[in-house]
Image (cartoon, grey):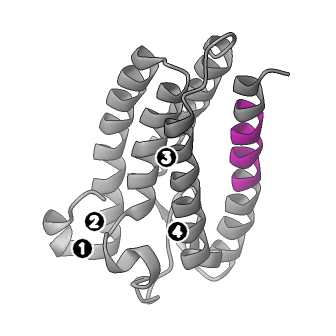
């Protein structure tokens, strides 16, 4: 198996593992009385991310690997782990709000309101560039920006209420 396909296999396995963790955490939070916000946009987000992976799988064959950009992608994965570890059982792929629970303010949340979205923005742009697929980076970055506009607005309204207008994507 060539290096691009090894990288894609690892990324795909990571995403599948995260879906298992997110599902478990979602069930746990719902059992505590948490509610989902913005459920209507969730299938669109899943389709976007799945399409990104499929397009990469279909286009990486025979592409050279840009090692410095791969290094940046690895750093993004470390930041992703930091976000997930900071949120613990409160991390999901959905917007799940536990009424009365304090906002998480430690870890990367000391610096940004939405650090995971910064990681996702970077991943969607950088991984295609690792393989020289500029068009994939551009197309999916634009689609992701539209998705995040909806998602962050929904999440910020749920978490910050009247102060949502002050929320900065990040």
What whole-number distance in Å separates the C-alpha atoms at marks 4 and 1?
A: 23 Å
What whole-number distance in Å separates the C-alpha atoms at marks 3 and 1?
A: 35 Å
Q: Is residue 112 visible?
A: yes
Q: Secondary structure at mark 1?
A: helix
Report if the CB atoms under discs 3 and 4 are less than 8 Å apart: no
Q: Quadrant of residue 93?
A: bottom right
Give left or right: position of 30 versus 113.
right
Graded by Cα atoms within 10 Å as few (under 14), some (14 to 19) or many (20 or more), the crowding at tag 4 reads many
Q: Is residue 38 visible?
A: no
Report if the CB atoms under discs 2 and 3 are less than 8 Å apart: no
The quadrant of the rendering that contains the N terminus is top right
State the residue position of label 2. Answer: 157
Instruction: Between label 3 and label 1, give the one nearer the viewer.
Output: 3
Instruction: Identify the disc placed on residue 72.
Output: 3
The part of the chain drawn in magenta is: 8-18
Return the x and y of residue 10 as percentages of the image width and height: 75, 40
């Amino acid at each position: 198996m060539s290096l691009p396909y090894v990288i894609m296999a690892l990324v795909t396995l990571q995403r599948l593992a995260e879906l298992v963790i997110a599902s478990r955490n979602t069930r746990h939070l719902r059992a505590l009385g948490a509610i989902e916000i913005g459920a209507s946009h969730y299938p669109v987000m899943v389709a976007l991310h799945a399409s990104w992976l499929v397009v990469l799988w279909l286009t990486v064959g025979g592409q050279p690997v840009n090692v410095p950009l791969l290094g940046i992608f690895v750093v993004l994965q470390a930041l992703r782990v930091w976000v997930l570890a900071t949120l613990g059982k409160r991390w999901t792929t959905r917007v799940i709000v536990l009424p009365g629970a304090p906002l998480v303010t430690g870890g990367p949340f000391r610096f940004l309101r939405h650090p995971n979205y910064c990681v996702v923005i970077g991943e969607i742009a950088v991984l295609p560039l690792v393989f020289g697929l500029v068009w994939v980076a551009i197309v999916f970055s634009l689609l992701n920006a539209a998705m995040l506009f909806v998602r962050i607005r929904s999440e910020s309204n749920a978490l910050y209420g009247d102060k949502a207008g002050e929320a900065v994507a990040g």
